[in-house]
């Protein structure tokens, strides 16, 4: 059995994974794998194909595990699936869903789904990601990079207890990259929520404060 605690501090874990088993027909990825995630930033690091995106989908409830349990802030996904999913926000590697909406409409939709949506922070991230000029433009007409900035912004203001960002740095312009790095550094320092970031590259100042989970070594 592999057990991983992402932080050795006295803080109680908020997200728990126990006995995870999952793999594909030609390749097992996780065998009786357990983990504990605490607030702050956890960096999922590893080569392409090591299981970063798969683990993100499993944590988000977007992919069913063969075996294992997931608990977030006392809510088990098997017993409280809706409550569990509303306590986290996952930004996947694919295109933004609901691309018939404008960014403004999408933010409104997210605000209705997540009761702790942080409207006060929305303008900050709209400015940081230079989204003001695109707020009324349908998402499907925007570039991949701009769509990802909208999706990441929604995650950052969702007010959830956990944020899962799968390769968020890719496709960002220089200014947006700098804004995200600043946000991740603040999240790592303030430790108000769990922020799990999968990336094959270093993400600047936040890296020094992040807990590193090397999937190359842990996934079996």
Image (cartoon, rainbow, N blue to C red):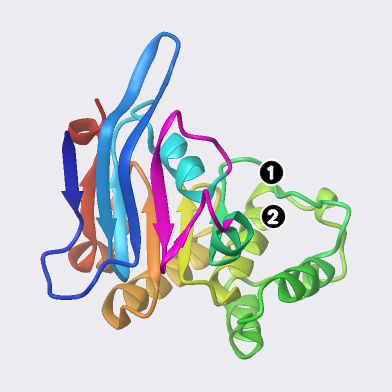
Residue drawn at point x = 52 percent, y = 48 percent = 78
Crowd tier of the residue under label 2, counting other residues whose Cα lies within 10 Å: few below 14, some 14–19, many 20 or above: many
Is the residue 149 above or below the residue 212 in the image?
below
In the displayed orientation, state which residue is furthest to the front: 79
Q: Which residue is mark 2?
A: 147
Left or right of residue 77, residue 69 in this image: left
Tell me whether the residue at label 2 lies in contact with that at label 1, contact meaning CB atoms closer than 8 angstroms: yes
Residue 159 falls left or right of residue 69: right
At a point 54% along the width and 60% down the height, the residue shown is 84
Q: SS of the residue at dot 2?
A: helix
- Please report the residue visible at 38 percent of the width from the left and 57 percent of the height from the top: 196
Q: In the rendered image, which quarter is residue 188 located in?
A: bottom left
Within-10-Å neighbours for mark 1: few <14, some 14–19, many 20+: some
Q: Is residue 193 magenta?
A: no
Q: Earlier in the sequence, mark 2 or mark 1?
A: 1
In the image, residue 31 sits, relative to residue 190, either above or below, namely above
* Residue nearest the observer in this picture, 64 or 27: 64
Residue 111: x and y in percent read 72, 76
Does 23 appear above or below 112? above
The picture places residue 131, in percent across and down from the top left corner, at 70, 71
Rendered location of residue 135, percent (x, y) = 80, 71
User: From which residue to which does the magenta span run?
Assistant: 62-80
| Residue found at x 33% / y 25% | 29
From the viewer's perspective, tell me whether residue 10 is left or right of residue 171. Answer: left
Indicate the quadrant containing the N terminus: top left, top right, bottom left or bottom right. top left
Quarter of the figure that contains the C terminus: top left
The residue at the far top in this view is 26
The vertical placement of 9 against 201, above or below, is below
User: Of 11 and 111, which appears nearest the observer?
Assistant: 11
Q: Name the residue carrying label 1.
A: 95
- Is 67 colored magenta in this rendering? yes
Which percent across, then down, holds residue 35? Answer: 26, 49
């Amino acid at each position: 059995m592999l057990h991983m605690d992402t932080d050795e501090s006295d803080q109680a874990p908020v997200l728990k994974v126990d006995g995870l088993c999952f793999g594909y027909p030609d390749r097992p990825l996780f065998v009786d794998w357990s983990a504990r995630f605490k607030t702050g930033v956890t960096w999922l690091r590893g080569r392409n194909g090591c299981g970063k995106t798969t683990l993100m989908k499993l944590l988000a409830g977007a992919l069913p595990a063969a075996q294992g349990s997931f608990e977030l802030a006392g809510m088990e996904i098997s017993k409280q699936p809706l409550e569990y999913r509303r306590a986290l926000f996952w930004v996947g590697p694919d295109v933004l869903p609901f691309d018939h909406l404008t960014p403004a409409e999408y933010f409104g939709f997210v605000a209705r789904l997540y009761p702790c949506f942080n409207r006060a922070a929305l303008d900050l991230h709209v400015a940081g990601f230079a989204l003001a000029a695109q707020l009324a433009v349908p998402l499907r007409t925007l570039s991949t990079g701009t769509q990802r900035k909208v999706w990441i912004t929604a995650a950052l203001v969702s007010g959830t207890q956990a944020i899962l960002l799968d390769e968020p740095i890719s496709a960002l312009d220089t200014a947006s990259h700098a804004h995200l790095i600043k946000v991740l550094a603040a999240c790592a320092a303030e430790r108000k929520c769990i922020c799990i970031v999968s990336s094959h590259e270093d993400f600047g100042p936040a890296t020094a404060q992040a807990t590193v989970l090397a999937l190359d070594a842990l996934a079996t």
